[in-house]
Image (cartoon, grey):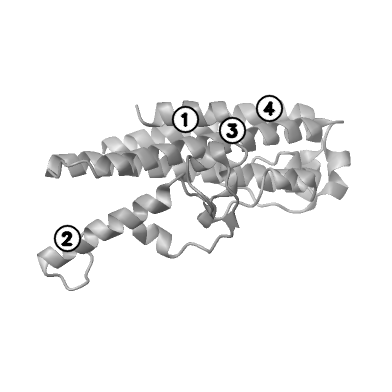
Amino acid sequence: MKEKTTFIRRRTTLLHRIDRLRTCRDKFIPGLTHYLNSICVPDVPRSTPELIPLYPPSAIPTEDRRSVCAANIDQIEERLRFAQASEALTQLRLQLAKRTCASRYKFRGDVSQQYFTRFRELLEQTEIKIKAARVHYNTARKALMSLCGPGDWEETYQVLKASDVVGLGERVLVAEEKAINERMEKLAGLDGKQLTWDAADAYHELEPQPLTAFVPQLARGEGTRTLSWIWYSAGDQELTNQTTEACE
């Protein structure tokens, strides 16, 4: 009952925010109502505000954007989307660093049930934040493709694949965890059956990646290895700050 009440309250708050946004939007996209009527867009019930489309300039076809939107409003969204994509990547790298630190902490001795319960809760919270950062980045990139079209910006903001969402040194930890689980399976006499869920499951289906050259600030003493492109846009200061914050 409490969860249902909280869900309804959040929906109501979201609906109020959408109403305020629509009031502001009508000033900068004055032709939107006429445009939506011309293409016969069905209304979404107010009882499900999470499904209501917002129709920013990027959601309007390029050929109609100039007649629907106020002058230069698409350029403002473009700057906001670049900032959104950059912030999403920063958050993604931070959460991946936290996941890596949590995995390293898992291997330190204590094997009590309370320990693993606390670890699982931490890992689940981190995974939720990783998924949210991926959604924010993909939303921003899709909008940028609509606003800018293909261009040099794609070198920095590439397509984010599942295989790209990997922390520094995380594949080594996955291999270590897999080896530990195999030893536990043998001791338990399970004959190859998984004793517990492990992070390696998530990586067995990853797409293969090309090997990248040695980069001192990223490789941290390692030679040629598989490294996701998301880490090449991070500066030295960000890497230092993330490592400190993630492992606190």
Q: Which residue is mark 3?
A: 87
Instruction: Answer whether residue 171 is visible to the viewer in this image.
Output: yes
Q: Amino acid at mark 2?
A: Met
The mark closer to the camera, 3 or 1, is: 1
Q: Label 4 crowding class (10 Å Cα cut-off): few <14, some 14-19, many 20+?
A: few
Earlier residue among tags 4 and 1:
4
Q: Amino acid at mark 1?
A: Gln
Q: Label 3 crowding class (10 Å Cα cut-off): few <14, some 14-19, many 20+?
A: some
Disc 4 from disc 2: Cα separation? 60 Å
Q: Nearer the viewer, residue 152 or 148?
A: 152
Where does residue 100 sit, x and y in percent of width and height? 38, 42
Q: Which mark is residue 184?
A: 2
Q: Quadrant of the C terminus?
A: top left
Q: Amino acid at mark 3?
A: Glu
Find numbered disc 1 in the image and state the secondary structure of the residue it sits on: helix
Q: Label 1 crowding class (10 Å Cα cut-off): few <14, some 14-19, many 20+?
A: many
Q: Which residue is mark 4?
A: 23
Q: Residue at x 73, y 43 (%)?
A: 144
Earlier residue among tags 2 and 3:
3
Q: Nearer the viewer, residue 133 or 45?
A: 133
Q: Dots 4 and 2: beta carbons under 8 Å? A: no
Q: Which residue is mark 1?
A: 242
Q: Residue at x 72, y 47 (%)?
A: 154
